[in-house]
Amino acid sequence: MDDPDQSVPARTVIPAMRVVGYPGPFSDWVIASIAALLGQAGHQFAVVNDLTDDHVGVQLLLGLNHASTHRDLPIVVCLDNPDQALQHLVAQGGDVIGHTRALTAVIAGLNGLHRRPDALLIRPADSESAAGRLAALLGVGLGDIAPPPMPVLEITPLTRQIADDFLTPIVEMVLSGTPRNFLLPRECLMCRTHEPASAIVEIAGPARPLYFGPFFHFPPGAWEVELELWFSHDVGDASFAAEFFTGVLLSRARMRPGKGGWYQAVFPVLIDHPETPMELRIWVERGAIEGQMGLRQIKFRPITPPP
């Protein structure tokens, strides 16, 4: 008979863990790699949707102890390159601006998660070392992990522009914690007809927003925003305003060009709630009988605090 006082070592239980990131083949591979490592180590596990958090994207818990508070779990952050992630989503259907909006929510939702001591950040460049790092995080032996899928996606011009000018800079900014310049392409905005913003719009008509959107999640910080605008020579005494809005007014600038030509409007905006979608509105402030306005680009530059 066994000695009842003799302690029997308990089998190590793999704790639950979170996986967050962009949806797509790369995050699918990360999740499959975790499942393979756990399975090869002889551990039973489950994959469940994490529906209790506000983040968008891949939201999963893996492991046995799902009663744990998910905010205290080890976390794997898997981020594909923005151009590939965006093009993959577009290939599944839907419009590029809507998918960009979803990716900005994922980026805003990171909120420093990747810097936690129990977090593991995996990007495509880390694919060769990912299996060993995942095994170490899980506390299991290194098993056989297939290489990640490498789908060949033809990046469309608009996807490339949004990825290069906007998504890639803000991803690198969030990951590094170092502010940098980025552009918001005009094509991310809409006109009053809810159609993609055109380069030139008519101002004739009542007071109204001429451009609005994109309802993206922007990185936090103090920014100097520069609008590069064009006005026709018949603009007259029309006045214009630009404002950032998140349910409350964040910043507003007024413009009265008086004559035609290219103009730069520069004004500050403080973004301290990146989890809230933000809207830029460019208004004609009162009715006009003629004239046109154009928008070429929107540039964000970090405002360096004084020493």
Image: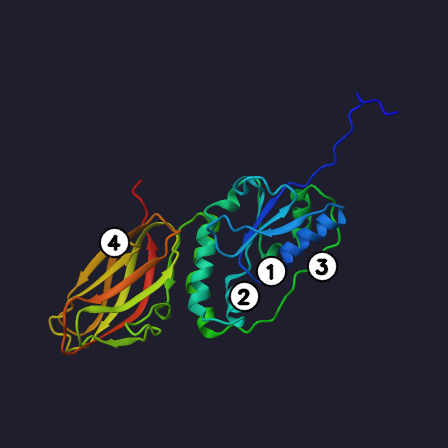
Residue at left offset 22%, top offset 66%:
283
Q: Residue at x 60, y 63 (%)?
A: 25
Figure check: 214 above or below 8: below
Q: Residue at x 62, y 69 (%)?
A: 151
Q: Residues within 10 Å of mark 1 (few under 14, many from 20)?
A: many
Identify the residue position indicated by label 3 in the image. 146
- Going from N to C along the chain, the mark reached first, 1 or 3, is 1
Tell me the residue that label 4 is attached to. 249
Spatial CA distance of label 1 from label 3 is: 12 Å
> Of the residues shown, which amino acid type is indicated by label 2?
Gln
| Helix, strand or loop at mark 1 | helix
Q: Which mark is residue 248?
A: none
Distance of mark 3 from mark 2, alpha carbons?
Answer: 20 Å
Q: Earlier in the sequence, mark 1 or mark 2?
A: 1
Measured as percent of width and height from the top left, residue 146 is found at: 71, 59
Residue indicated by mark 2: 84
Mark pair 4, 1: CA separation = 38 Å
Q: Which quadrant holds residue 280?
A: bottom left
Q: Secondary structure at mark 3?
A: loop
Q: Quadrant of the N terminus?
A: top right
How many neighbours does mark 3 have within 10 angstroms: few (below 14), some (14-19), or many (20 or more)?
A: few
Look at the image and tell me whether residue 210 can be seen.
Answer: yes
Residues 122 and 23: in front is: 23
Q: Whole-percent x and y of residue 108? A: 44, 52
Horizontally, is 305 left or right of 128 in the view?
A: left
Q: Which mark is residue 26?
A: 1
The residue furthest right is 1
